[in-house]
Image (cartoon, rainbow, N blue to C red):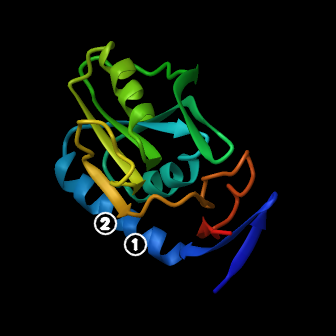
């Protein structure tokens, strides 16, 4: 099993680059059908979703635009339970289909805030796409339209996901090794 060290923690290979790309292909295929003739605005959540958003955006063949917002809810390996908006989008949202692109949905707290913030601008529709979903950690009551891979409630890094800002550059996804 391939292992990496990020800062002071050990991680083992969990999801390969090929598995990630297959999951994105599946999400895009569903989007192509659902969003046909919609000209969606993709809004990616920084920093974590930048790789997912980039790969998905390159594969989506319909008319669309992309923008970015930044929220924070993690400190180290733990969620704080509080969501802070750091930067927002300046794209026209009113009357548009908006697709939020997120690297991972675990508790659902951040995504709930993002949806609330976007709905203030009266979009036609808001959809959620996440590469990774932790159903065992999810505590909110809304549905996610596009899920790449459902995973257990383990701490992971790589492919945009970080541990204290490190590990985002890994092409695969690794889970923390229990001590």
**Viewer-proximal residue, 61 or 134?**
134
Q: In the image, residue 146 lies at what x, y percent? A: 29, 52
Q: Local crowd at mark 1 within 10 Å, few (<14), some, or many (≥20)?
A: some
In the rendered view of the protein, which quadrant contains the N terminus?
Answer: bottom right
Q: CB of mark 1 within 8 Å of CB of mark 2?
A: yes
**Viewer-proximal residue, 93 or 22?**
22
Residue 72 vertical position relative to residue 123 in the rendered view, above or below: below
Q: Is residue 2 left or right of residue 65?
A: right
Q: Residue at x 38, y 38 (%)?
A: 108
Q: Which residue is mark 2?
A: 26
Q: Quadrant of residue 173?
A: bottom right
Q: In the image, residue 83 lies at what x, y percent? A: 52, 25
Q: Secondary structure at mark 2?
A: helix
**Viewer-proximal residue, 128 or 28?**
128
| Label tally | 2
Q: Which residue is mark 1?
A: 22
Residue 64 vertical position relative to residue 20 in the rendered view, above or below: above
Q: Residue at x 39, y 55 (%)?
A: 134
Q: Quadrant of residue 28?
A: bottom left
Q: Residue at x 51, y 61 (%)?
A: 154
Q: Local crowd at mark 2 within 10 Å, few (<14), some, or many (≥20)?
A: some
Residue 147 vertical position relative to residue 85 in the rendered view, above or below: below
Q: Secondary structure at mark 1?
A: helix
Residue extending furthest right?
A: 7
Q: Is residue 40 left or right of residue 143?
A: right
Q: Is residue 100 left or right of residue 158?
A: left
Q: Is residue 138 left or right of residue 82?
A: left
């Amino acid at each position: 099993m391939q292992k990496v060290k990020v800062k002071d923690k050990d991680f083992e290979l969990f999801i390969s680059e090929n598995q990630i790309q297959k999951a994105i292909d599946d999400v895009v295929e569903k989007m192509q059908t659902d969003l046909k003739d919609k000209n969606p605005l993709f809004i990616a959540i920084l920093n974590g979703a930048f790789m997912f958003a980039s790969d998905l955006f390159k594969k989506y063949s319909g008319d669309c635009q992309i923008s970015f917002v930044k929220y924070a809810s993690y400190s180290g390996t733990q969620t704080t339970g509080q969501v802070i908006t750091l930067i927002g989008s300046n794209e026209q949202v009113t009357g548009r289909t908006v697709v939020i692109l997120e690297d991972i949905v675990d508790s659902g707290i951040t995504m709930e805030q993002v949806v609330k913030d976007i709905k203030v601008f009266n979009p036609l529709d808001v959809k959620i796409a996440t590469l990774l979903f932790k159903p065992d950690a999810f505590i909110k009551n809304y549905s996610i339209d596009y899920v790449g891979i459902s995973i257990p409630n383990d701490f992971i890094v790589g492919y945009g996901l970080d541990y204290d800002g490190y590990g985002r550059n890994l092409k695969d996804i690794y889970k923390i090794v229990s001590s």
